[in-house]
Image (spheres, coloured by chain):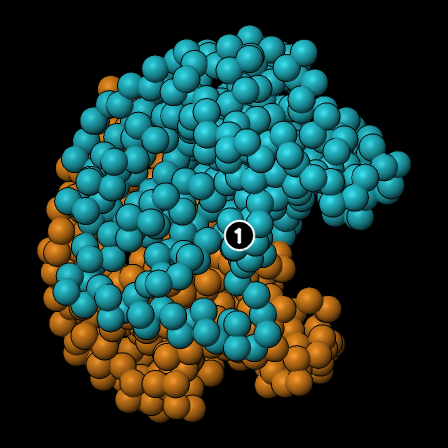
Chain colours: A orange, B cyan
Amino acid sequence: MQADGKFAERRSMNDEYIRLSLDEVAALSRDILSHHGLAPQHVEAVTATIVAGERDECASHGIYRLLVCANTLKTGKVVKDAVPVVHDIAPALLRVDAGGGFAQAAFARGLPMLVDKARTNGIAALGINHCVHFAALWPEVEAVAAAGLVAFACTPSHAWVAPAGGTKPLFGTNPIAFGWPRPGAYPYVFDFATSAVARGEIELHRRAGKPIPEGWGIDAAGRPTTDARAALDGAMLTFGGHKGSALATMVELIAGPLIGDLTSAESIALDDGAGSSPIGGEFILAIDPAGFLGAEAAQHIERAEAVFDAIVGQGARLPSLRRFDARARSLANGVQVTRRLYEDVQALLG
Amino acid sequence: MQADGKFAERRSMNDEYIRLSLDEVAALSRDILSHHGLAPQHVEAVTATIVAGERDECASHGIYRLLVCANTLKTGKVVKDAVPVVHDIAPALLRVDAGGGFAQAAFARGLPMLVDKARTNGIAALGINHCVHFAALWPEVEAVAAAGLVAFACTPSHAWVAPAGGTKPLFGTNPIAFGWPRPGAYPYVFDFATSAVARGEIELHRRAGKPIPEGWGIDAAGRPTTDARAALDGAMLTFGGHKGSALATMVELIAGPLIGDLTSAESIALDDGAGSSPIGGEFILAIDPAGFLGAEAAQHIERAEAVFDAIVGQGARLPSLRRFDARARSLANGVQVTRRLYEDVQALLG
């Protein structure tokens, strides 16, 4: 436990917010996860992503996510003491069998071999199997980019999203993420759902009793709807029409059957109404610029900076910039969460 | 020359259309390209994609494209007798230096080693450098899928497209393509621009004097426009807002600096107003399902069919279906082109 004592002295910004250090966030996460029976290796790996999410102000993947984690642990669908097993299956491929546990520990186990294989062969891919995935993908692509490699990752989820022109849920929200190492800076990172929005966004509208914009969902009869409840009972839509739908299909295939794992439809069928996080696979690609470029790698990586400069120079934003700004603030000053969320999470210890 | 004599007996469907066999399309392409000084190896490789485009009723990549090819050849920006050179640079990577020639011959030279490397290592990538790329990417991903491999390809183009939130051209239309082998069927293939539409689509609106829909482009001052001319002089937009913009950035990076080649901004600067097709690189990825799955590959590839069945079963369409339907028609009955286009192309021999 790294809690540094500040936990007890937390001070309210006002009646609504509580400020926590990142160590306090970690301690809270460890307490909750341990209390729900998660084995120490998983507690550490999951806590790392909870802290990263809160630190980067990805509210839905920070402390809030402990509520979802606890619920998933209660469903009995997660193997709490799973021991990930690494399989070296081809010169440039590996699989990690997560054994039904959370994906984080499996990724941590597979990462060193993925990096080694990419450096040796120029490119390599990791398939994580039989894992429960509940987090964003940017921690994975950032970890690969931190090794100086170009990264791509994707994962199916539960069948909530209809294909373009269709009427019924088939795809998951099927996020894709990409990371590009930048000298002396945070990597270029994007991580987005191939659904029009995150499912949680529609859930928030439902709770607030607000209509959703057109293009987010269809009702159970396949008709466009602005009713959040109807969209949750019907199907979500992909972003970008048939193009987003094609990308969602790619994710189903390469992070599903290609690595011998479940599609989103199979995942939700296995869940059978229990409300667990999606269970299945994740696909992660790593490419070594030095493999393509040899001694000229640094020079071309530097040349890529002109692309980022041109984006920023015309007033556009790089994806993840908001996260990196939040990270700097959080590293300096800690984070703040609502008192209500803090109390809801504390109640998980009861 | 494989022209089979039907060329002379072509019959008008009516005053507007002329029917040609695929051999006649090939003969026409060979005549035009040879007439413009293209070396025989390139004539064959380019003709294969012209015939494939016309056969699949991709009008802009069939016979029509000969007009663009001829123009590109006239600019002097293409090395007409370039000899592609294959470089084996890492166990799972290769580069092909196209030597300033059209990409097709370079791809043809690199494909066997890409397939070999993917089968040996489980995954492999090919970077084509210093090529002039004017075609769709589906021929490449179909060729890789025909070897039983999963394929991904992308290429930058000329800087015509603004990043989301920006005002100035930076990205090319940056297409991405994906291919998945299907037992006993055409592969699952998508191939789309990360711009909202193809540049040619805006050009067609301009010629017809028709307004373009909102979301296709902005004017030179960065304001949304429905004026085709203003969008061509300003910037095109990506599909899917910031998500499409992120994908376009990924294409710039992995088919540009990662393989030591030009970004779209560098390509259009090199063109310097000559109006040539884009010059630069192409990135092609191949993954062997047997690498991940061993003896179980066929079983999981078969399981992927449930995804396609579920898409089609709810009345949605698979991408490329229109092309494959057209292919069946063209293989049986040949193709039809407008008399005007046919005469415009014939005039290139003058």
Tell me residue B147's x, y (percent): 28, 48
Give the position of the C terminus of chain B as an image quadrant.
top right
* Residue occupying image coordinates x 22% and y 81%: A79
Q: Residue type at mark 1?
A: Ala
Depth order, front residue of B221/A217: A217
Q: Quadrant of residue B99?
A: top left
The residue tagged 1 is: B332
Task: Kindly identify the residue that appears in the image at 21 percent across and 27 percent down.
Answer: B89
Q: Is residue A58 left or right of residue B13?
A: left
Residue toward you, A221 or B324: B324
Q: Position of residue B117 (x, y in %)?
A: 20, 40
The chain containing the residue under callout 1 comes to: B
Residue at horizontal 57 percent and vertical 26 percent from the top: B28
Q: Is residue A133 above or below residue B177?
A: below
Q: In which quarter of the view is residue B224 placed?
A: top right
Residue A111, placed above or below residue B235? below
Task: Give the number of callouts.
Answer: 1
Q: Callout 1: 10 Å neighbours few (<14), some, many (20+)? A: few
Q: Position of residue A66 (x, y in %)?
A: 39, 76
Q: Secondary structure at mark 1?
A: helix
Seen in the picture, residue B220 relative to A247 is either above or below; the reply is: above
In the picture provided, is B82 more to the left or to the right than B156?
A: left
Residue A126 in the image: x percent, y percent? 24, 55
